[in-house]
């Protein structure tokens, strides 16, 4: 197994380009199942999770090839509608094939994903939604079996919480249903918008993009897609927070600042200079020295569905608050168990108290945290440890970095190019 070693305390300077969004690539790859033929997806990040999704498609009979960041997927013939446990257990987003498989084949058998490091994460909204479209679902031997004896029919679906993959799954099922489907309290994340654009390009009829109410008029068939994955807003936010914590001046390119309204506002409140261009963000933060007055202020955050503060940046924001001056209150409202990074940050000197979904972080102020041996527990928790390691004095060793590789393309190489002292070594 590999681990990351960071010699902290080096500010970051230069330019860094963002990759395509993992959480947009996954549903867009699944959506190619909707129409037989050769699809092309551009700006697809080469990550463990996108490779897993392509493997799921391969098991279903599709063929694919990658040329740099373009991925061609041929879904002309499908061999079956079953996504096995071995793949789904490694990535719960594999359930995104349920919607397109039911729409195209009338049945699907997909392993139930099971627990996850950040919470229970059920898929009851997805299943209830499919039932509204006339699909029969049942659980057997750990698998969800979904069958529709006739063509799916439109219906009204209401989500108790705006579920991102729930909205995507239902959209993909509804585009080929007979009649109209209305999805109420739909997720408004930009990744959902990216999927809607792809489906529109394939000939689907969807109204309400970027709103919480989507209306889908089912069509008879769809054409293969040629679609571009949007830049990864969570990767972008992670680099914004890394520069804020380590100090320096970096221009983040190939990104969409409009997709990070809450984060950029909060980072400005912290005292970091943020300049937004059309597809660039320039971040300038002062370099901290042990014993000198702290220039970063503590601010509070509450994670919320888009356009609120993303839960996927909560851990990384906490790493920044660890080195700020004052007290920050962090409310995690989306997932019940998303503070696994706290125990690891505490090994580096963080002062954090947790009470349910609330973390109270007492910033270290004039004290610079110290490097330590820490363990990554999930994807975003790993990123928070990298940020803390960059801001710390001395050496930080992060194990279980396979989590990081699920969602960050070439993170070590990108940080190296910005002047960080970081390397990957075999354990
Ligand atoms: N929920 C249910 N039942 C459901 C679906 C969701 O109770 O059937 C609850 C969840 O437990 C949670 C809330 O609804 O409390 C919202 O969850 P959502 O369904 O939106 O999460 P998701 O679609 O499973 C996606 C991202 C996550 C991201 C969340 C929230 C993908 C592939 N994953 O998950 O990304 O944290 O939305 O924004 O899009 C990550 O990239 O690290 C990651 C975990």
Image: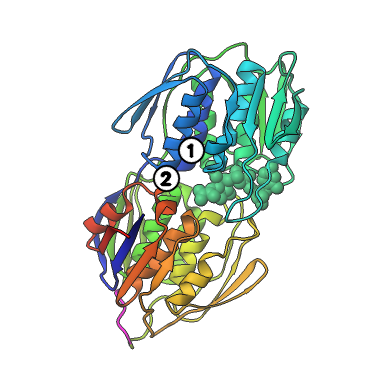
Which residue extends farthest top?
A: 220
- Residue of label 1: 24
Question: Which residue is at 61% across, 17% downward?
Answer: 104
Q: Would you identify the image quadrant in which residue 14 lies?
A: bottom left
Q: Residues within 10 Å of mark 1 (few under 14, many from 20)?
A: many
Asked whether residue 122 is in view, the answer is yes
235, 46: nearer the viewer: 46
Check whether the beta carbons of the residues at disc 1 and disc 2 lie within 8 A of each other: yes
Is disc 1's CB within 8 Å of ligand 1? no
In this orientation, which residue lies closer to the viewer: 276 or 253? 253
- What residue is at 73 percent from the left and 33 percent from the top? 140
Residue 232: numbered disc? 2
**Whole-Å distance between the Cαs marked 1 and 2?**
8 Å
Please provide the residue range marked out in magenta.
286-290
Prevailing SS of the magenta stretch: loop
In the image, what residue occupies the spot 46% across and 31% down?
55
Q: Which quadrant of the figure has residue 132? A: top right
Look at the picture and state if 405 lies above or below 211. below
Q: Residue at x 64, y 43 (%)?
A: 163
Question: x, y percentage for residue 293?
Answer: 36, 85
Question: Is residue 306 visible in the rendered structure shown here?
Answer: no
């Amino acid at each position: 197994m590999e681990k990351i070693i960071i010699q902290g305390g080096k500010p970051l300077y230069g330019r860094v380009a963002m990759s395509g969004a993992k959480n947009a690539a996954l549903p867009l790859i699944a959506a190619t199942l909707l129409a037989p033929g050769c699809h092309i997806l551009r700006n697809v990040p080469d990550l463990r999770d996108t490779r897993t999704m392509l493997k799921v498609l391969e098991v279903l009979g599709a063929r694919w090839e990658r040329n740099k960041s373009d991925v061609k997927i041929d879904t002309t013939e499908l061999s079956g509608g079953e996504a096995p446990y071995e793949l789904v257990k490694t990535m719960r987003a594999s359930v995104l094939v349920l919607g397109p498989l039911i729409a195209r084949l009338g049945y699907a058998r997909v392993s139930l994903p099971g627990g996850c490091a950040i919470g229970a994460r059920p898929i009851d909204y997805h299943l209830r939604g499919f039932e509204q479209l006339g699909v029969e679902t049942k659980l057997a031997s750990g698998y969800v079996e979904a069958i529709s004896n006739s063509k799916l029919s439109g219906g009204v679906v209401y989500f108790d919480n705006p579920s991102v993959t729930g909205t995507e799954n239902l959209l993909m099922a509804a585009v080929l249903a007979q009649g109209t489907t209305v999805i109420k309290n739909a997720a408004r994340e930009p990744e959902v918008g990216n999927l809607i654009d792809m489906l529109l390009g394939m000939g689907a009829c969807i109204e309400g993009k970027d709103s919480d109410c989507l209306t889908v008029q089912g069509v008879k068939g769809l054409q293969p897609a040629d679609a571009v994955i949007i830049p990864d807003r969570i990767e972008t936010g992670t680099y914004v927070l890394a520069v804020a914590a380590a100090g320096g001046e970096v221009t983040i390119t190939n990104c969409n600042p409009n997709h990070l309204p809450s984060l950029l506002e909060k980072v400005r409140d912290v005292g970091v200079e943020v300049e937004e261009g059309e597809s660039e963000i320039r971040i300038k933060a002062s370099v901290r020295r042990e014993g000198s007055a702290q220039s970063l202020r503590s601010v509070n955050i509450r994670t919320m569905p888009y356009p609120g503060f993303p839960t996927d940046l909560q851990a990384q924001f906490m790493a920044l608050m660890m080195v700020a001056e004052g007290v920050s209150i962090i409310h995690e409202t989306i997932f019940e168990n998303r503070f696994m990074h706290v125990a690891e940050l505490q090994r580096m000197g963080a002062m954090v108290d947790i009470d349910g979904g609330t973390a109270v972080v007492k910033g270290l102020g004039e004290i610079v945290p110290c490097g330590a041996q820490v363990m990554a527990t999930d994807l975003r928790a790993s990123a928070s440890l990298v940020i803390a390691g960059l801001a710390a004095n001395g050496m930080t060793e992060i194990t279980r970095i396979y989590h990081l590789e699920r969602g960050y393309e070439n993170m070590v190489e990108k940080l190296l190019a910005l002047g960080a002292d970081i390397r990957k070594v075999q354990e």
